[in-house]
Amino acid sequence: MTAHFPILQVIIPLFAAPLCLFLRIPRLVGVFAIFVSAAAFLISYGLLQEVITHGTISYKLGGWPAPWGIEYRIDTLNSFLLLLVSGVSTVVLLASLSSISRELPQNRHTYFYTAYLLCLTGLLGILATADAFNVFVFLEISSLSSYTIIAIGTDRRALAASYQYLIMGTIGATFILIGVGLMYMMTGTLNMYDLAERLPAVYKSKTVLSAFGFFIVGVCLKLALFPLHLWLPNAYAYAPSITTAFLAATSTKVAVYVLIRYIFSVFGIEFVDMSLPLGDIFLILGLVGIFVASISATFQLNIKRLFAYSSVAQIGYIILGLAIETQLGITATLLHLFNHALMKAALFLAIGAVFYRIGSAQLNHYAGLGKKMPLTMAAIVAGGLSLIGVPLTVGFVSKWYLVVALLDKGWWPVAVLVLLSSLIAVIYVWRVVEWVYFTPPRIITEEVKEAPLSQLIPIWMLVLANIYFGVDTRLTVGVSKLAAQSLFGVNL
Amino acid sequence: MNIIGLYNYWIVVVLMLIGFYIVIAHENLIKKLVGLTIFQTSVFFLYISMGKVAGATAPILDENYQIYSNPLPHVLILTAIVVGIATTALGLALVVRIYEAYGSIEENDIQVQDTHDRLECQLEAYGRQKPPTLFDQETN
Amino acid sequence: MLLSFLALTAIAITRMGDLFAVVMLSGIYSLLSASLFLDLDAVDVAFTEASVGAGISTLLFLATLKLVPRYEKKSRYKPALALGVVIVTGALLIYGTLDMPHFGDADAPVHQHVAPRYLNDSINEVGLPNVVTSVLASYRGYDTLGEVVVVFAAGIGVMSLLMVSQRTKARALTKVPADMQHQIILRIVAKMMLPLILIFALYVQFHGDYGPGGGFQAGVIFAAGIILYTMLFGLSLTQSVIKPVFVEMLTAFGVLLYSGVGIVCMILGGNYLDYDVLSHDPVHGQHLGILLIELGVGITVAAVMITLFFKFTWRTVKHKYNQ
């Protein structure tokens, strides 16, 4: 049974999604989805253990050997992210039962859960596969279902946002398709590890460089790297809360994974260094992205939009770690991937809980909620502190590693800029705090109560995880270091 | 030789660019989707062209033929075509809903309405004291 | 030359403001592409492009145009930035072509590495003459599963976006005639054609192992038959024969069948989608597996296409009724 783990964690949600249509009773479907996601989570936990003790696992789909058939290959890097995606998905689903019933008409619930599970399938599939074209297929599964779960709500702006995402996402996917095609053209193979073996022979080829360019731009569209982030703020702001929590925590992270995988495992860092000043480009885009997005965040009135812009800024930090191109830098990137997922999931779930009670995500409607919903608000503050990078939170850990990596490389001006940018985070988080605790409510809202337990529990699970992994960093730092080592080990 | 050998690819590149141009330059939501279709179809040519072997026949095994074209790009493109129609269908459904909600399928009209909504929220929050900043309009 | 026609069509599309014409031209573009694919030995691809690109896609665009304005607003159109982006992309692409293996070159890497095994050994390993089907359904069967899931995901998306309440349906059902109610000749011809179309679909479905065809094409053709019927005889009549809920379940059933075959393979001791274990003889097992998964593909594709059409048509009905 354990031999089938690599495929099972993708197949379980894949098989479960169409089953949802047969179940049809909304509540039942919701509970079913939780169990499915939890099963995927347990399997990915098993996979992580297996990979740490026994090394990389390869799984041949259809029983065909690698370059002819499709291969799944699990190593430290992707098992770490599999764990993250399935874990966050499970916790978010826990909160979904009540949240969805508030935000969606009942006849759409089944569709929502079906699309949600498909999206999960797609994301897990991208992480597990070792086949370049398979990435494209699963990318499209996750994208099409994310367009659905964004647009499914009642806000009309979600429709326009979803359309914009669809156009930009499809352009990105088509660029990836061009990239894969050109790579295939020069090597005759689609398997990533086979590609890695065959690409060095054609490193000098202009076609490979062009392939690399298209692939990188395509993936950067998906991960919303500044200035390709335009689809993100609206998509996150107007989607149902559960969608936002799930996508914010997972989908861009998976795109970052693809980027890392291709730069390090497929093309190899030597090629990248030789052909393109990618490090410098990432450095500049990352830094500009951090500042522009953070400053935009301080002007937002819609709290979901505010944190969506902050997500774009966080992508900047993640890319910055990549730009350093050292083992420490990658460790910082991976840590921040994990940690940022925890923060954003907690924040957006808490915002969802507020929406559940007051039906709004406008900051001015948050006035006075500090007294009415103390636990939820405390969660938002904790998430905000983590975003800033206050000690004892996960945000501190990853910023610390990032700054250390920057100093190690000798880029102290960049390190200073990173610290400065944290000050902007202080400003936007403070704006939230100001509305919540220090502004008298203009409208008297007597009936507003604390969020229901079904939402408080998942929120606080994530908040506690934020604090736990901020103190006890053995698992996250350990695994990130291992993954970073293996990424460099392969290519040195 | 060089020119002739690559001529096919260059036309394909031009087709791709036309499609891509339609997607990003036009405001009409339907036309953008048409552009996307053209863009994708042209990428399919790239794949299928590379699978062609001069003098070969379709990869259906038969005793009368010896050389076949490469079947793998065909398989990949079959998949990609179906992915393309799936995306188009979903996009069109979104367009229908957008038209019902906004009364227009021009990107600009939609953005204007969205900005208007946001400004009203600002007004509600801050009253007249703090007019919406320039920055907000830029980052819509 | 076909390619020049394609370029002309594409340029015409950018210039036109009448969306109806644009959609028609894009249909033509698809048809031309299909002939070009045929020219390049990609028969299966040509078949699919003709049925999907020129058929279903055009149909969906037209169905949408019934619901939205027909003309593009002019002068809203800022080409400078777009042109810049396009030129950069184009430059990168042209730059990339410089080192490409030449068109038709048999020594290109793509013909040397992975593909030879498909061409030489698939007849022994999978046992089908159509190599495209072997690769599609067996060697890369998992991609095809993914593709069916993509279709299913799109189906779910459209179902959730274009829902029509039972109330509207009940009120509208009796009052909406078919659009082409009075086209007697068309109706009679269609009646004669329908069984032929459906039989052809089944032929394509089960003959894909030997000639071009398979689940996708069959599914699309089957759906086209039903859609033709609906257009001529009205939604209410079709839906009294085929219940929409049933079709929705079929979309899920195809995916279940496909992934279910994979799970059965696992239970029988093979890897996921390893059809060898389905029977005592591996080649026979491959046959059985491919037959079943192609059926799954056909069911999902046909059901999703029919659902898409129903949903768009219901939307039209709803609009009419509301006015």
Image (spheres, rainbow, N blue to C red):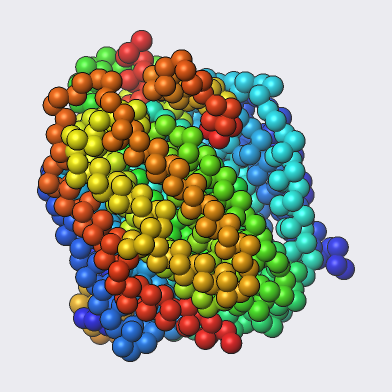
Q: Which image quarter is the C terminus of chain C in? A: top left
Residue located 64% across and 51% down the image: B42
Q: Whole-percent x and y of residue A273?
A: 68, 74
Residue at point 40%, 53% (across, down): A387
Residue at the top extreme of this rendering: C323
Q: Is residue C185 visible?
A: no
- State whether residue B109 is above or below residue C114: above
The total of numbered circles placed on residues is 0
Viewer-side residue, B51 vs A26: A26
**Side of A113 relative to A140 (left or right):** left
Residue furthest toward the bottom?
A54
Give above or below for B11 relative to C107. above
Q: Is residue A42 left or right of residue A343?
A: left
Q: Is residue C50 above or below residue A328?
A: above
Residue C297 found in image quarter: bottom left
Residue A359, quarter of the rendered image = top left
User: Residue A14, image x and y in percent?
Assistant: 29, 60
User: Residue C28 location in percent, x, y?
Assistant: 62, 39
Residue for point 33% across, 83% down: A51
> Closer to the camera, A213 or C265?
A213
For image coordinates 31% across by 75% down, the residue present is A475
**Residue A429 is at least partly visible in this image:** yes
